[in-house]
Amino acid sequence: MRDTPLSNCERDFLLKAIQEKKRLDGRQTYDYRSIKISFGTDYGCCFVDLGKTRIMAQVSCELITPKENRPNEGLIFFNIELSPMASPAFEMGRQSELLVKLNRQLERCLRNSKCIDTESLCVVSGEKVWQIRVDVHLLNHDGNLMDAASIAAIAALCHFRRPDVGIQGEEVTVYSTEERDPIPLSIYHMPICVSFSFFQQGTYLLVDPCEREERVMDGLLMIAMNKHREICSIQSSGGIMLLKDQVLRCSKIASVKVSEITELINKALENDKKARKTGGKFGFAESLPQERITALKTDVSHVEMSDVKEKANEIVQRAEVPPQTVPSPVLTAPGTGQVGEGLENSWGLKEEEEEEEEDETVELKMELEEGHEEKGRGNYLPKFCFPWVSETDSPGPRSVCAVFYGHSLQDSTE
């Protein structure tokens, strides 16, 4: 497993919260997360949501040859799959320590407790028996996988129907669901696992730990029990020593939780049976409008929509009236633009004109200096004449020519 390490700050925060009898999701010490049980379209398919932990269990069957030492008993096989889809800590194709532990615990809980009548699975003694296979797939991991897996497995077994079988001489005929109604399994009781996590060497106790609480716990106690208060299996893991009083206290808590979960499973089975009889929606078709297929769906927020029109009219009345006409931009001269109000932009044309004027002035100065050095100040023929219009009292304009003689300036008027 490629587990992401937990930082020291998170670890200290979780332990401090547990000491103050507080949990991340606001639960109390002995509270379970919300449990949702739904069934698929086919018999034997069950989905269980324990908080954000989501598990699917699928039951199938086939005819095989029984074991020699038990010729009259069928077989039950369990298989758990931890895929990287549920958590990045799981790796595909490798059996981790967690997978082996969950598989063994599920076998102790359901197969070794004799909750299913295996003799009823016999078709022909010593030749044909039914093998029941339970595949448990983890869809999302948020802690307490054993409890969710046990609930999904026993609910799927209760919901499963095997085909009916007819025997004529040595011939064994398996009838389809259209020919004969399928037969349910013979189940004596429903064992369910309840997990308890211990902190600070057994000082603090929590029921149904989440994924982050499992990382900081010191030990884990799993008790498999049915509603008749019969302990089917018990397993302790971690480096802590539990006292007899602690185990008895946990068993009393487990008896209450198991009775509540058993009642919830029976109610879910009754609802599915009624829906199938009345022809209503069930299984995959029912989960589509309710958005129960995805594990982490968003919660629906209820919004008051009764006085929406009145509030919209009030907002429209308070708003300012928009102008009817849009003012067109004013272009003061060709090649210019307007940005904002009253702002002119020359788009770089003015800057280019200023640079050209500076270049002409520098060239003019250089040519004047060259002519002054060659001819001197006397008898100098002017090369440049800059005409302009002078403002005088005379009615007509007067053209003035300024002639440069080195450092002197002479005016000639026409």
Image (spheres, helix red, strand yellow):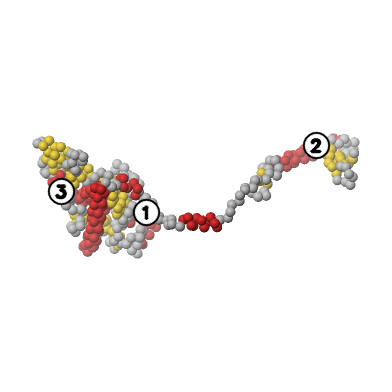
What residue is shown with label 3?
A: 117
- Hey, what amino acid is under mark 2? Glu
At 90% from the left edge and 40% from the top edge, which residue is drawn? 413
What residue is shown with label 1?
A: 6
Q: Does residue 312 appear left or right of residue 372 in this picture?
A: left
Q: CA distance from mark 3 to mark 1?
A: 45 Å
What residue is shown with label 2?
A: 367
Q: Position of residue 300 (x, y in %)?
A: 39, 53
- Hey, what amino acid is under mark 3? Asp
At 53% from the left edge and 55% from the top edge, which residue is drawn? 316
Q: Which of 371/117 is in front?
A: 117
Q: Residues within 10 Å of mark 3 (few under 14, many from 20)?
A: few
Is residue 257 shown above or below 73? below
Q: Does residue 197 appear left or right of residue 175 in this picture?
A: right
- Local SS, label 3: loop
Q: Residues within 10 Å of mark 2 (few under 14, many from 20)?
A: few
Residues at marks 2 and 3 touching, judged by CB atoms closer than 8 Å: no
Q: CA distance from mark 1 to mark 2?
A: 83 Å
Q: Does residue 91 appear left or right of residue 364 in this picture?
A: left
